[in-house]
Image (cartoon, coloured by chain):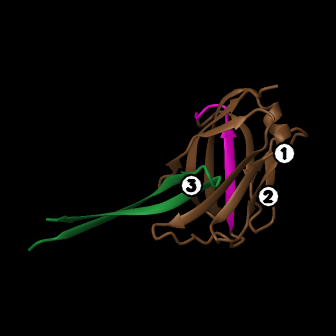
């Protein structure tokens, strides 16, 4: 399984909200509502494997909010929620404070679905953070 | 005697809907059948 590619354009100081739906070819939702499914969002400065993470967000397995797990600093906030309706839907939010504190430029991200030892790449790409108009 | 070789590969297709602010991740299975 290979993940798709999707580049994200974001603005400094604005909440980044991304709504996803995971479906099969027939348009039916892929059911990820089970607590064994965890969604992980990794953001790095480069796509190099050994590069340090900017941050990692994870859903907590059920339909409650997950949170940013690394780095655990006061200025990094965001979460991933599984709405459960439809069964493949989830929302990723990076709070405005975090977007304010990210340096302008381009980052690399990967979105993955984890079920025990099985890791499924969902999508990956670049996040370009542009300057806000003040 | 002819043989069939069937291979299947999955990938995800991304379909953004900017109007609805929604990104669909569609699991696509490509199946190839080769007759030898």
Residue A49 drawn at (x, y percent): 59, 37
* Protein chain holding label 3: A
Residue at 20 percent across and 70 percent down: it is B4
Residue at 68 percent across and 49 percent down: it is A41
Looking at this rendering, what residue extends furthest in the front direction?
Answer: B19
Looking at this rendering, what residue extends furthest in the left direction?
Answer: B1
- Chain in brown in the render: A
- Chain in green in the render: B
Is A110 located above or below residue A112 in the figure?
A: above
Which residue carries the number 2 mark? A66
Residues under numbered marks 3 and 1 in contact, where contact means CB atoms less than 8 Å apart: no
Residue B7 drawn at (x, y percent): 31, 64
| Numbered tag placed on residue A77 in the rendering | 1
The CA span between labels 3 and 2 is 18 Å
* Protein chain holding label 1: A
Residue A19 drawn at (x, y percent): 67, 56
Magenta part, dominant SS? strand
Residues under numbered marks 2 and 1 in contact, where contact means CB atoms less than 8 Å apart: no
Which residue carries the number 3 mark? A122
Which is more N-terminal, label 1 or label 3?
Answer: 1
Residues under numbered marks 3 and 2 in contact, where contact means CB atoms less than 8 Å apart: no
Residue A114 drawn at (x, y percent): 63, 60
Q: Quadrant of residue B6?
A: bottom left
Part of the protein shown in magenta: A37-48
């Amino acid at each position: 399984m290979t993940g798709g590619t999707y580049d994200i354009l974001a603005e400094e100081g604005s909440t980044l909200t991304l709504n996803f739906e995971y479906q099969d070819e027939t348009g039916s939702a892929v059911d990820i509502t089970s607590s064994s499914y965890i969604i992980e969002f990794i953001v790095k400065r480069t796509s190099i494997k050994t590069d340090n993470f900017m941050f990692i967000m994870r859903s907590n397995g059920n339909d409650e909010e997950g949170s940013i797990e690394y780095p655990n600093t006061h200025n990094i906030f965001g979460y991933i929620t599984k709405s459960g309706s439809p069964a493949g839907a989830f929302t990723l939010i990076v709070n405005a404070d975090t977007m304010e504190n990210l340096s302008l430029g381009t980052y690399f991200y990967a979105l993955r679905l984890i079920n025990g030892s099985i890791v499924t790449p969902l999508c990956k790409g670049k996040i370009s953070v542009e300057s806000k108009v003040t | 005697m002819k043989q069939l070789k069937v291979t299947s590969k999955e990938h995800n297709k991304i379909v953004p809907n900017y109007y609805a602010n929604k990104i669909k991740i569609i699991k696509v299975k490509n199946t190839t059948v080769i007759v030898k």
